[in-house]
Image (cartoon, helix red, strand yellow):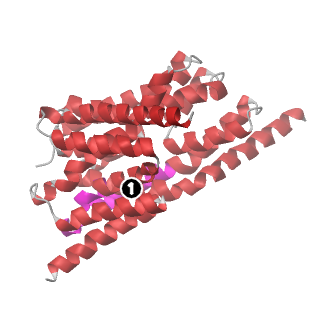
Amino acid sequence: MSPDSGTIWIVIIGLGIGTYLIRFSFLGLIGGRPLPEWLLHHLRYVAVGVLPALITPLVIWPHATGGQPEPSRLLAALAVLVVGVWSNNVIGAIAAGMATLYGVQFIIGSM
Amino acid sequence: MEFSTTMSNTHRTFWRGFLDCSPFILVVAPFGLLFGVAAAETGLDLIQTMSMTILVIAGAAQFTALALIDDHTPTFIVILVSLVVNLRMAMYSAALVPHLGKAPLKTRMLASYFMVDQTFAVSIRQYEHTPQWPIKEKLAYYFGAATSICPFWYGFSLLGALIGKAIPESYALDFAIPICFISLVAPMLRSLPHLAAALVSITMALLLAWMPYNLWLLVAAVAAMMAGARTELWLKERQT
């Protein structure tokens, strides 16, 4: 079931080199030339553009349940989101999510 | 005499950077731990997990790669999408040029390696307060910040990888990845353009899920970035 080792090494090395080149780009090579304004505007939303799209299917159709929506995972995701937005606290949000995940699983398990 | 005062100044600045960045240990440590656990869960061995953590040293991209590997995505797409997650660092790199751009090449190469969200955020805030600092002090501050958090990233990834295998399936640790991501994104959603981008991102992911090779991820990301940038412009126009 686990992915083959060659593929993983290609990802590690490709991602390592690519990420380094992104970091080195301006500081190392391009120097003081400023980025165009429109590009800066878009780069600001890279994380918030990619990550929600990546997470959504993992939350709704988790692999661990064979792609079936599952209450403890859905509620845990909601808890992380609510606590994260409300408290602006990353660790608190993770703790709330984990507590919800195990709490709901415990309740379902004992029903 | 003058030499020794500069030395002690640089020394002090290094520790100041170290201290200013240290609160982020509380963020980096649990993420590192969860990364190690999630990597073990995905099927990476100890050497692969640590190679990724040391070579890539970028949590969000590492989690992205894991999620996509686990989803049997073609290798090329795994690398491409994870790199898109790291594109924000081009912005960091550009923003550091006015402060560190005059350093020797070797130093800039090293500084590039340690360019993570936390070192960047702490350093650029400091440089804006003290733009007159000589480059030596700016570098000392930067590397002080890196020294305080990066070892924790490596160490806790290692710890996670070591204990990950020992944690039974019933703990649902597959869900560590979504939980980490949501906790990273949630605080951003307090600004309207970010919220707009996130909503477009989610909607596109659901609508385009039929696309092969997880290509929907790239389409959704580009559309969401445009939505964020548009909303920002629209808000600015409304203000004037």
* Horizontal and vertical percent position of residue B36: 33, 53
Determine the residue located farthest toward the right in the rendered image. B1
User: What residue does disc 1 label?
Assistant: B183
Amino acid type of the residue tagged 1 in the rendering: Ser
Give how far across and how far down residue B123 sits, in percent: 62, 40
Chain where mark 1 sits? B
Q: Is residue A63 above or below residue A23?
A: below
Residue neighbourhood size for the residue with mark 1, other residues' Cα within 10 Å, grouped as few (<14), some (14–19), many (≥20): many
What residue appears at the point 17 percent right and 40 percent down from the top-left corner? B207
Which region of the structure is painted magenta? Answer: B151-177
The quarter of the picture where the C terminus of chain B appears is top right
In which image quadrant can residue B57 be found? top left
Magenta stretch: includes residue B168: yes
Horizontal arrangement in the rendering, residue B42 relative to residue B119 (left or right):
left
Is B109 left or right of B36, judged from the image as shown? Answer: right
Position of B36 compared to A35: left or right? Answer: left
| Residue B81 covered by magenta stretch | no
- Magenta part mainly helix, strand or loop? helix
Question: Where's residue B208, x and y in %?
Answer: 16, 37
Left-right relation of B79 to B193: left
Which one is nearer the viewer's eye here, B61 or A10?
Answer: B61
Nearer to me, A48 or B97:
A48
> Residue at image x 26%, y 66%?
A75
